[in-house]
Amino acid sequence: MRENLTLICTECKEENYINTRNKKKHPERMQVNKYCPRCNKQTVHREKK
């Protein structure tokens, strides 16, 4: 069962990306390095609650 999720920047708290993941296989919250246009650099993006 794949579920849509929103990724937010940890520095500026802006919602930048929409992604999907399988909740049964990966129950923990997602965290990835992505480019943030507002910060103008790569930052850690976490799954929104």
Image: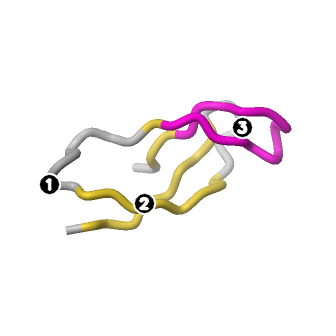
Q: Name the amino acid, label 3.
A: Cys
Q: CA distance from mark 1 to mark 3?
A: 30 Å
The answer to which image quadrant residue 44 occupies is top right
Q: Residues within 10 Å of mark 3 (few under 14, many from 20)?
A: few
Residue designated by label 1 = 24
**Left or right, residue 23 beside residue 31:** left
Total residue callouts: 3
Q: Name the amino acid, label 2.
A: Leu
Q: Position of residue 46 (x, y in %)?
A: 49, 40
- Asked if the residue under mark 3 is in contact with the one under mark 2, i.e. CB atoms within 8 Å, the reply is no
Q: Which of marks 3 and 2 precedes in the sequence?
A: 2
The front one of 38 and 2 is 2
**Magenta segment:** 32-45
The front one of 11 and 44 is 44
**Left or right, residue 27 beside residue 9:** left
Q: Name the amino acid, label 1.
A: Lys
Q: Which of marks 3 and 1 precedes in the sequence?
A: 3
Name the mark nearer the viewer: 1 or 3: 1
Residue designated by label 2 = 5
The answer to which image quadrant residue 40 occupies is top right
Q: CA distance from mark 1 to mark 2?
A: 14 Å
Name the mark nearer the viewer: 1 or 2: 1
Residue designated by label 3 = 12
